[in-house]
Image (cartoon, rainbow, N blue to C red):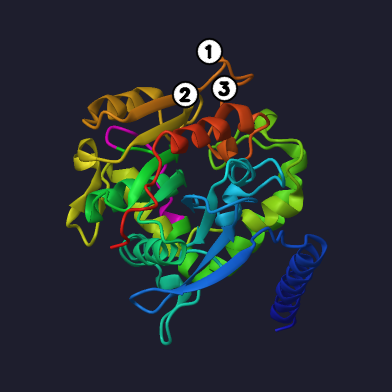
Amino acid sequence: MSGLLIAAGVVLGLFLMGKGYLLFLRMHYREPIRADEVHGVRTEDGWQITLHRRCPRQGRGEPVLLCHSLSSNHLNFEIPAAESVVDVLIEAGYDCWGVDTRACRSAVPPRGARKGSATLDGALLKDLPAAIAFIRETTGYPKVHWIGHSLGGMLMYAYALRFGPDHIASGVTWGSPPGFKGMRFRKRSALNAVAPFAHGIMEFFMRALIPLAMRLHPKTHLLPINWENVHPKLSNAELFHSVELPAPKFAMQMDAWTSSGTWVMCDGTLDVQEHLNELKVPLLAVYGAKDPLVPLHKARTFFESLAHEEKRMLVLSRQNGCEVDYNHMELAFARNGRRDLYEPTAAWLAAHPVNPNSAVE
C-alpha cells in the first residue's frame, strides 16, 4: 500500500509540476495580439470559429483568407512580428483574414459536443464556407484570395472541387501535398489511439518543449524544418502560441490518407486526389526543395496535370536563387521569406485582382 501511495504521490507531483511549468510559460510568453479586429463566426452546425483581421493602412483592400497548417493557427502567417507574410500583404494594401478552424484552441463547440469531435470534413464543409461568407459580407467583395500553408492549401483544393471556384479570386499554396499516392509515411497508430484521451497532456509536452527545441534545433522526421533557415527574429513566445496539437480526428484522418495513399473527404463522396487536375483556380504552388512531405517529382506531376492555364510553380532552392534549400515548416517564418516567398505571393494576388464592382451573390 505504501508503494502505491508513493507512486501516486510521484505522479501527482509530476502533474502539478507540469501544470505549474505550463502556467509559467503562459505568463512568461504573452500571446501576440496583432489583429485589428477579432470576429467570432457561427457555423451552420453550431461551432464558433474565429477570424483575425489585419487591415491595410490605406483604403479598402481586397480580402485574403489565410488558412493555417495542421499544427498551427492564424499566427502561422503573422510571425515574426513585422516580417511575416501578413505584414507584407497589408503593406501592399490587402485586407488579411486569418482563420482559426474548429481544430484550434479558440474554437467553441456547440452545446453537447466535445472539442475532440472536430473533423476535417467539418472544417471543409462548415468552417470555410462560413468564413468566406462572413468576409464577403463584411468587405463587400464577391471573392477572396486564399493562401494556405500545408493542410490550409489542401483544404483550398478540396473546397474548390466541392463548392466550385466562384468565390476564389486566386490561390497560393505553400508546401501543400497534392495527395499521397505512391508515398510512404510512418503510421502513428499508437499516438492516434492515445490522443483522444490524452490530448491535453500531449499538447502540453509539445508546447513545453518549444524553448528547448529553439535552442537545440533537433533533427527528427516529426519536425520537417531547416533550422538554419528560421528567421532570427522569431521568438519563443510567438512559436509557443502559434503551435496547435492537431485535433485527434484531424490527425487520424491525415494518418489514414498518408498510410493508404488516398485523399477522400465528404464522407467518402469526394476523391480529392483523383480530381485535382480539374482545379479551376489561378494557382501559385510553392514548394521547398527539401520538403519530405512533397517530393518535387510529385509536385511537378501535379502541376503539369493542371488544365487551368493560370498557374505557376515556385521551388525554393539554392538552384533557384535562395540562400538555402527550404524544408516544410519554415515556409511560414523563413529568414529570407519576404524576398523568396511573401513578395512573390503578393505579386500573384496582384496579377489576379478581384473586381469590387461585381455584385455580391
User: Mark 1 belongs to which amino acid?
Assistant: Gln
The quadrant the C terminus occupies is bottom left
Residue at the spot of label 1? 319
Query: Is the residue marked by circle 1 packed among few (<14), some (14-19), or many (20+) residues within 10 Å?
Result: few
The question of residue 166 being in magenta is answered with: no
Specify which label sits upstream in the sequence, 3 or 2: 2
Most common SS among magenta residues: loop
Decide if residue 175 is in sight here: no
Q: Which numbered circle lies on residue 315?
A: 2
Mark 1 lies on a secondary structure that is loop
Residue 196 x, y percent position in the rendering = 46, 68
Please give left or right for residue 304 compared with residue 341 in the image. left
User: Mark 2 belongs to which amino acid?
Assistant: Val
Q: Residue at x 58, y 52 (%)?
A: 59
Mark 2 lies on a secondary structure that is strand
Mark 3 lies on a secondary structure that is loop
User: Mark 3 belongs to which amino acid?
Assistant: Asp
Q: Is residue 158 above or below residue 334?
A: below
Q: Residue at x 59, y 19 (%)?
A: 322
Q: Is residue 284 above or below residue 17?
A: above
Residue at the spot of label 3? 325
Magenta-highlighted residues: 181-190
Query: Is the residue marked by circle 2 packed among few (<14), some (14-19), or many (20+) residues within 10 Å?
Result: many
